[in-house]
Amino acid sequence: MEPIVVIGAGLAGCEAAWQIAVRGGQVLLYEMKPEVYSPAHRSPFFAELVCSNSLKSESVENASGILKEELGQLGSLILKVARETRVPAGDSLAVDRTAFSRQVTEALEKLENVEVVRKEVSSIPQDRITIIATGPLTSESLSKEIQKVTGSRHLFFYDAISPIVTADSIDYHVAFKSSRYGKGERTMSIARWIKKRMAGLWRP
């Protein structure tokens, strides 16, 4: 069986390589570090966290928590290592960045059916299954190749950051203030707000 090519050893690439390998597949995992670094990366290890060390909430009452529950059921390497290298962060799953990246790297390098190739990929293989997991910091040469395949003039990265709005732009006749997850002051549940609205008792 031909190896499946995974380009990029970030969170997604490492998880893809792991899931393929533990199910008996052969993997060629390409990572351009330390030959080439993006403007944000500094470490030669895989799964380097460059923005935040938090992987968000583990509560199954929100989307990120449900995703972690699903990853756990699939035997996720990223989730397992994150829990082993966690640091205090309230309800969030935050990790020691260096320990996390090093442990993910070591786990993948130990697998016999994963061959790690430390070089920049500038063209997409045409003769085998390939997963491109290079994220928003894809090298310029590979970005151009992806554009050729997709036919797009530009590649876009959409962050999960919350939108910022000004207070005076909010219509408080149809909105209300509440602390996040109901854990601070000025808390009002949606159910209570609806009851007040229906009873005509809500005042912005």
Image (tube, rainbow, N blue to C red):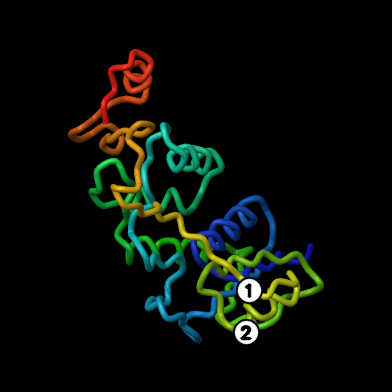
For residue 61, side relative to residue 111 (left or right): left
- Which percent across, then down, holds residue 169? 35, 48
The residue located at (56%, 63%) in the rendering is 13
- Tell me: residue 52, above or below residue 198: below
Q: Secondary structure at mark 2?
A: helix
**Mark 2 or mark 1, which has the lower sequence index?**
2
Q: Which quarter of the figure has residue 175?
A: top left
What is the distance, in whole Å, between disc 2 and disc 1 at their CAs? 13 Å
For the C terminus, the quadrant is top left
Residues at marks 2 and 1 touching, judged by CB atoms closer than 8 Å: no
- Which percent across, then down, holds residue 134? 56, 69
Considering every residue shown, the one lying at the far top of the view is 199
For residue 58, side relative to residue 89 (left or right): right
Looking at this view, is 5 or 187 the one in front?
A: 187
Q: Can you tell which mark lies on residue 141?
A: 2
Q: Can you tell which mark lies on residue 154?
A: 1
Name the front one of labels 2 and 1: 1
